[in-house]
Amino acid sequence: MKHKLITCVLALCLMLNVLPAASAAGGPSLSYTTDGSNAALLSVENLDGRVYGAQLELELDGEYRDVDFVPRDNSAYAPACRTEISGGKTTVYVYLAPDSSAPLGGSGQAALGTLRVDGRLTLPNTATLTLLDRDLRPYDGADHEAVSLRRAGGSSSGGGSSNGSGNSSSAGSDSVRVSGAEHGDVRIRPSRPSRGDTVTITVTPDRGYVLDRLTVVDKDGDRLDLRQVTGKDQDDGTEVYTFTMPRGEVEVRAVFALEEEETPDVPGNIWDPLPFTDVEESAWYWEAVAYAYHKGLMNGTGPQRFSPEAITTRGMIVTILYRLEGSPAASLSRFRDVVEGQYYSSAVAWAAANGVVEGYSDGRFGPDDPITREQMAVILSRYAQYKRYNTGARVSLSTYGDAAQVSPYALEAMQWARAEGLITGTDANLLLPGGNATRVQIAAILMRFCENIAQPQ
């Protein structure tokens, strides 16, 4: 029986210049507070002030199909979760990524966040804790260490939302109301958050429907910023978003629409309307965005937004090619900065295994680094070679004023990309090899690649 797999990886990255010791005196331990229901607030204690990261592994009795983790740090990256169900037990892997310049547990203790499950939560007496160094790698003496997990003294608070004191309580909490939501399911965690809490919205459309619009407004009717955690990559079309809770009641408005039948041989329907309010039909890049979107190569950055001028990262590019390849099975990545469970993890592992990417000389891949135009050319060239397309075309770059700035490793790839019309110069007769590529530039390059290079299967 295939069990539902929820993936949530949050790596901790705090910028200091020394390597941490294995642990503080007495070793790290874990504690929790709970009201005995389906949630518990987890904290780690006895931390060395120089710890850069950690991951937590819990084995729960029972099979839980719906597990999530809401970080205590309101500036943390949005959570996702990885669970494995086997033999009547559920193993939960929890990570956290606070966006902070202070080390994790600088005072020796850190409230991690609230774990919630779809049923009564009973925590084990021990858990597995891995401490990470500056490069997010387990370091000696702190890799997969068994630690105690005990209930903290004082008032219970695991079932409520975190407040400013670091404890959890329903006092002073506000509600999140869902409106609309016909033909779909909208789940809010926590349902009564406090101001500043990170609220997670999980949206699952009914069969035959898709999420059309999702907005969150405060008590004054002003829209709140939404952060998309996952797109509709799951089989059931589930999407996950988060927002920061303001003061007062919040309304979540979800609109679902009938799913249109997919057209074979995409992009035969690129003239269909786009769902993005920031892509005008008169824009030079409209056709390229429509191509990439209807081809399934690029999604939006949020409800009704494509973010045309946003910079594209290396992880995004590899993920796009991975989708173009049909998302084949992949092993674990060999790069030390690509942790399991990120949206690009399988894509990077596949690309590295097939020679599409090589990474940096220091063993990193740099998934969040903005991709340059010459890096894009190299990756596309290697992907074309992997597909056994003809990559023999070359053109001189000497007519461009910045041709000498092309890196030696990228020269042939840039000559090929220019010969095939994938990359063009600017009005100032420049190649800008080290310049960053925007999302619409990437969409245009992908459209040219698919139309001019890719061979019919």
Image: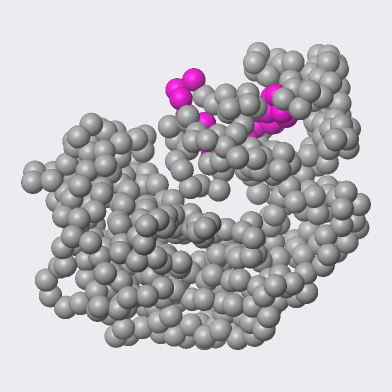
Q: How is the image coloured?
A: one colour
Up the image or down, 298 lies above or below 347; here it is below
Q: Which residues are magenta?
A: 361-383
Residue at horizontal 25 percent and vertical 78 percent from the top: 36
Residue 146, x across and y down, in percent: 20, 47
Up the image or down, 423 lies above or below 315; here it is above
Residue 22 lies left or right of residue 337; in this view the side is: left
Indicate the quadrant where residue 376 lies: top right
Quadrant (top left/top right/bottom left/bottom right) for the C terminus: top right
Does residue 385 appear anywhere in the picture? yes
Does residue 369 appear anywhere in the picture? no
Find out whether residue 442 is within the magenta segment: no
**What is the total number of numbered labels drawn onto the structure image?**
0
Find out whether residue 363 is within the magenta segment: yes
Residue sitting nearer the eye, 262 or 299 = 262
Residue sitting nearer the eye, 39 or 15 = 39
Residue 405 lies left or right of residue 107; in this view the side is: right
Residue at horizontal 78 percent and vertical 23 percent from the top: 388
Residue 277 lies left or right of residue 353; in this view the side is: right
Residue 409, x across and y down, in percent: 64, 15
Residue 216, x across and y down, in percent: 57, 76
Residue sitting nearer the eye, 4 or 199 = 4
Residue 403 lies left or right of residue 50; in this view the side is: right
Up the image or down, 57 lies above or below 232; here it is above
Residue at horizontal 37 percent and vertical 69 percent from the top: 116
